[in-house]
């Protein structure tokens, strides 16, 4: 996989405000937040998109959802939040590294885009 801004954040060559990190994933504040709380949760292993995952990624993806839930609680999002995964260019994905947006802190509208 080619180098991305997220792989550089994982490597520590680009600074980020990190909220969570373990051996499998990390979460940090989005540089262009779309809500009062806007975190990006990424796997440390290179996966370009959700469209590329397989059965062998199930444990990692489940772990990331559990981490997202814990982060939502930690960030005080008791009244609700949204998790978004954009897939491919038409789906709005702008960085070729799988990432989950955790958005909250205000009432979110539907449809989103």
Image (cartoon, rainbow, N blue to C red):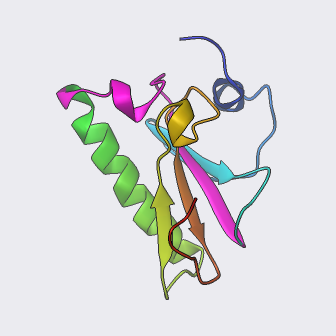
Residue 81 % position (x, y): 50, 74
Locate residue 1 relative to residue 5 in the image: left or right: left
**Magenta stretch holds residue 42:** yes
Which residue is found at the position 48% from the left and 81% from the top? 80
Where does the C terminus fall, quadrant-wise? bottom right
Locate residue 55 relative to residue 79 in the image: left or right: left
Which residue is found at the position 71% from the left and 25% from the top? 8
Residue 67 % position (x, y): 42, 57
Which residue is found at the position 43% from the left and 36% from the top? 24
Identify whether 102 is placed above or below 100. below
**Magenta stretch holds residue 111:** no
Which residue is found at the position 47% from the left and 47% from the top? 85
Q: Nearer the viewer, residue 45 or 22?
A: 45
Residue farthest bottom in this picture:
79
Looking at the rendering, which quadrant does residue 12 occupy? top right
Locate residue 82 relative to residue 4 in the image: left or right: left
Does the image show residue 73? yes
Identify whether 35 is placed above or below 13. below
Residue 39 % position (x, y): 63, 57
Residue farthest top in this picture:
2
Identify whether 16 is placed above or below 109. above
Residue 35 % position (x, y): 70, 69
Question: Which residues are drawn in magenta?
Answer: 36-55
């Amino acid at each position: 996989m080619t180098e991305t801004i997220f792989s550089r954040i994982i490597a520590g060559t680009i600074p980020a405000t990190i909220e969570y990190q373990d051996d499998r994933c990390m979460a940090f504040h989005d540089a262009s937040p779309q809500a009062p709380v806007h975190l990006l949760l990424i796997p440390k292993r290179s996966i370009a998109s959700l469209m590329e995952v397989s059965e062998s990624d199930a444990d990692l993806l489940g772990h990331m959802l559990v981490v997202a839930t814990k982060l939502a609680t930690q960030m005080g999002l008791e009244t609700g939040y949204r998790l978004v995964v954009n897939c491919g260019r038409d789906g709005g994905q702008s960085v070729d590294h799988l990432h989950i947006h955790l958005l909250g802190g205000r009432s979110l509208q539907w449809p989103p885009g």
